[in-house]
Image (cartoon, grey):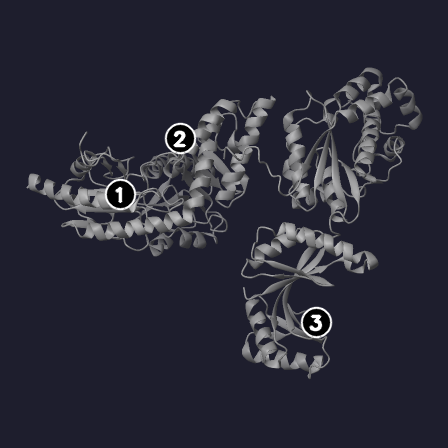
Amino acid sequence: MKGERYILMIYLDNSATTKPYPEVLETYRKVSEQYFANPSSLHSLGGKSEALLAQSRQQASSLIGVDPKEVIFTSGGTEGNNLAIKGAAFAYRNRGKHLITTDVEHASAHNAFHQLEELGFEVTYLPVDREGRVSFQDFQEAFRKDTILVSIMHVNNEVGTIQPVNQIGDFLKQYPTTVFHVDHVQGFTKVPLSLAKSGIDLCTISGHKIHGPKGTGLLYVRQGTMLSPLFSGGGQEAGHRSGTENLPGICAMVRAMRMTREKEEEGIAHLMQLRDRLFSGLSAIQDAVIHTPREGASPHIVNVSFRGIKSEVLVHALEKKSIYVSTKSACSSKDNGASTVLLGMGIPEDEAGQAIRISMAYENTMDELATFLDVLRQTVNDLKIVMR
Amino acid sequence: MIYDYLVVRFGEIAIKGKNKKKFVLKLEDDVREKLAEFSKLSIKRHFDDLEIQLNGEDTDRVIGRLQRIFGIQNISAAIKTENTLDAIKEGVLQVVRAEKDAKTFKIAARRKDKRFPIRSAELNQEIGGYVLKNNENMRVDVHHPDLKVRIEIGYYETRIYGREYQGAGGLPVGSSGKVMLMLSGGIDSPVAGYLIAKRGALIEAIHFQSPPYTSDRAKQKVIDLCRQIQSFGGRLKLHLVPFTKIQLAIRDVVPEDYRITIMRRFMFRIAEKAAERSKALALATGESLGQVASQTVESMNTINQVTNLPILRPLIAMDKLEISRIAKDIDTYEISIRPYEDCCTIFLPKAPRTRPDRIHAERFESHLDVDALVNEALEGIEQLTFTSGTDQAAFSELL
């Protein structure tokens, strides 16, 4: 790589995962060293771990504006979604068998619903429009007396579209027997969402999308909401999630939550500027088709196709210049075929197969984007000549 | 919200004669401390109330905080206008429109400045008429209005008050001297502490530990309870007494059915001494008549013998259900029901004596070196102080 122009890494795959903050790693190490005792142990060392866990829960809950009792620490977004969806469906199965979700959920939610279908639940998958958004009217029409669970992501992980979760939450306030779950993994610290009084009963957040360690996350469980646990065992996390608490991970994530929250206001404004720059830069490239809507989308994701260039080819070409973007969701990028989200939006299959996702973090700079856009323009041109 | 400021009215302290100034200053301190996070507020003290300029801070949140401070009777949101009829009319209309839930109203005008040309009764009619003309859905109800708009015409300006919010009542914490609360970790004693604090006492708490039979978690529970009681104002000092040695000594020489009685007598002796050191002039307990063996009249008589301090028992005539309800209101219930052993539960006899007497108690104690045991326990006391600022800093560098 010596002598190459683009040695500094430009990381634009922050929706897949983020780089942990150094302070977060320091917390992880210190807690692993100093508070290694099991919080459930009766001796004083365990007591210290338990107190630290309580303080972490306290801080996490105040950062998202809920009660400490409503925070369940999990291993991340996938577990949060599974626990919320299957846990609620099983807990309320005697009330009804109908569930509502969308066509564009993350695999961890989508496949959980498939599994529930096999177990005899009936699932309505709401379609999305050209912008990737479900319509409130469709939702209302799908809603039935025996709907026990509605699960909708806040921000789509592939195109960044914001779903009308506030409107749906308001509507569901009249139906206390329907549980409402929101997958907030991509939205957290990018698109503000208030949980208290929102009609939301369950909300999934992941640690590693906000510069925390992998294997961490939390599920907000509104007081009074029942969940059938996925893991049976020692009854940790108020019985919702057995297993010895991952204290270093929990503390590190809570620290990442605090640090990110502190930067949030400026960070979002900065992301919006970055996105504007991306939009104008991308539209200037020939044959670029931007799939992310200009309005009603998170500022950190831009999804774009370049006609005639398969996405995988472009991703690898860019990586040679130390620029990292992705094709689609990391959790489904190993499946063959085009993104189901883009297909759901009515984008033709060949164009969907040419899409890349650029996802930013607060740390990305205008300079990085300028370099990225230069390289991208050049790469797209080069590839066109080769592929013609 | 259209409101410019809040008026905080004092409860009983307004009738405390010459001591009133002291009470009001105390209350003002509490209010300033509780509202410290709202940096834009400005607080002014008047003879009969505190005036809090909101300057754009969230009215509902500020009122929520004020409702947790003892000594406040009620809180009104208000606006100020010039002393002209037109300005007053406009102001009243704004207030009425802001209180959207109200369907009926009443105007109650009062002239402090009698030079104002229109008399109160006429003013009520004039302004009421104006409101009716501009609000089709509103009706006047002079007996039970949803909204009573009070107008106070002063010498320089007019105050218009909208809805009135209930305060916590009681007296400012610290205005009634200091009381040593015997805090066990159960449901009752925190409630007793809260009620005593509500009457203006500054609380210190004393808790008896029996390590290694009781764990750090039982201690953490007491610490959490103290934080909760402290959240209603003032400063709270906790005395943690090492009690194991006394309990073991009692177990060795006292018949099983008298152990609780003797143990309680030791606790009161130690609490009395700790109170003297802290200049607390009374003890407080969460005892409720007849609730357990040590809370019968006979038990209290026998146990009370060891101290001359007044013992405040605010729960004495309350049922367990009433006590639990208050505990839930003040958020101590959930902490109290954590299942850790405390010093009272570990050496619990199977059948404690419900009617102990002083003669037996004295005879059993004659086998013990009471003074030495009490003094040793006093020497071993660990003190912790809770104020609003001292929230758990221990882990903050990690999080």
Spot occupied by residue B31 in the image (x, y as percentages of width and height): 66, 53
Label 2: element kind: loop
Spot occupied by residue B297 in the image (x, y as percentages of width and height): 87, 35
Instruction: Give the residue type that dot 3 points to.
Output: His
Instruction: Tell me the residue at 11%/44% (across/down).
Output: A381
**Residue B356 position (above or below residue A271):** above
Of all residues, the one furthest to the left in this rendering is: A388
Instruction: Give the residue type that dot 1 points to.
Output: Glu
Residue A2 quadrant: top left
Instruction: Tell me the residue at 74%/45% (across/down).
Output: B197
Spot occupied by residue A213 in the image (x, y as percentages of width and height): 40, 32
Q: Give the letter of the chain under mark 1.
A: A
Of all residues, the one furthest to the right in this rendering is: B359
Instruction: Give the residue type that dot 2 points to.
Output: Gly
Q: Which residue is mark 2?
A: A215
Q: Nearer the viewer, mark 3 or mark 2?
A: 2
Q: Which residue is mark 3?
A: B143
